[in-house]
């Protein structure tokens, strides 16, 4: 008996899980090899730098940083990706790092990468992004992709602008081979905390 339809459905709409601080979340796992993560970081930070916010999102703290300009350097050295905006930069361990004992170095690198979307009280999507976590389980990075319920300044939009899902649609197609999902366009607004 074939389960192709079930597998396709699960791939299109993975299970909804509850995460403290976020609520109902759906996640699409991504490969965590250095080459895939390197391409993903280049695509996100070179292609969408002016449209995204990024930082970390953990219970009790959310950092939403906006790039001041295009990155002046997106580099990779000794397993660490560097995203440099000139006045400041950050590093992420996405590959083999030779500068620490093997066991310690292995815990630093990305062990989980995913696209995610948060569902609101109505059950419809309300935010979209990319997350990376170390092998040890610590969050490395959250990228908040453009949101149709927010305008360019981050304020609530009067009406949803579904064109703001373009980055989400392109990245899902490129990394998951999934087409745009009509479900992403079913929400009516952004309500924090629900």
Image: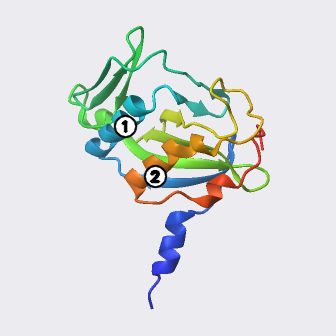
Q: Residue 108's x, y, as percent?
A: 36, 34
Residue lying furthest top: 87
Give the colouring mode of the picture: rainbow
From mark 2 to mark 1, how far is it between C-alphas? 12 Å
The crowding category of the residue bearing disc 1, from other C-alpha atoms within 10 Å (few below 14, some 14 to 19, many at least 20), is some
Q: Residue 115's x, y, as percent?
A: 50, 48
The answer to whether residue 63 is visible is yes
| Along the viewing direction, whichever of 59 and 86 lies nearer the viewer | 86
| Along the viewing direction, whichever of 104 and 130 lies nearer the viewer | 130
Q: Residue at x 46, y 52 (%)?
A: 172
Q: Taking 157 as reference, is 166 above or below it? A: below
What is the secondary structure assignment of the residue under circle 2? Answer: helix
First in sequence: mark 2 vs mark 1: 1
The residue beneath circle 2 is: 172
Q: Residue at x 65, y 48 (%)?
A: 118
The residue beneath circle 1 is: 43
Q: Residue at x 32, y 36 (%)?
A: 94
């Amino acid at each position: 008996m074939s389960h192709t339809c079930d597998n396709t459905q699960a791939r299109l709409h993975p299970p909804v899980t509850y995460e403290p601080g976020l609520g109902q979340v759906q996640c699409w796992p991504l490969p965590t090899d250095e080459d895939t993560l390197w391409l993903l970081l280049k695509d996100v930070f070179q292609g969408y730098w002016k449209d995204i916010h990024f930082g970390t999102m953990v219970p009790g703290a959310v950092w939403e940083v906006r790039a001041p300009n295009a990155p002046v350097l997106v580099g990779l050295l000794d397993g660490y990706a560097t995203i440099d905006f000139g006045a400041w930069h950050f590093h992420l361990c996405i590959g083999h790092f030779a500068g620490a004992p093997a066991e310690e170095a292995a815990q630093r690198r990305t062990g989980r990468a995913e696209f995610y979307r948060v569902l609101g009280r109505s059950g419809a999507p309300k935010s979209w992004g990319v997350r990376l976590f170390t092998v040890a389980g610590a969050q490395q990075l959250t990228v908040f992709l453009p949101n149709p319920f927010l305008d360019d300044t981050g304020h609530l939009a009067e009406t949803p602008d579904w064109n703001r899902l373009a980055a989400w649609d392109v990245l899902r197609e490129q990394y998951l081979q999934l087409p745009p999902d009509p479900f992403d366009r079913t929400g009516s607004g952004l309500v924090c905390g629900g």
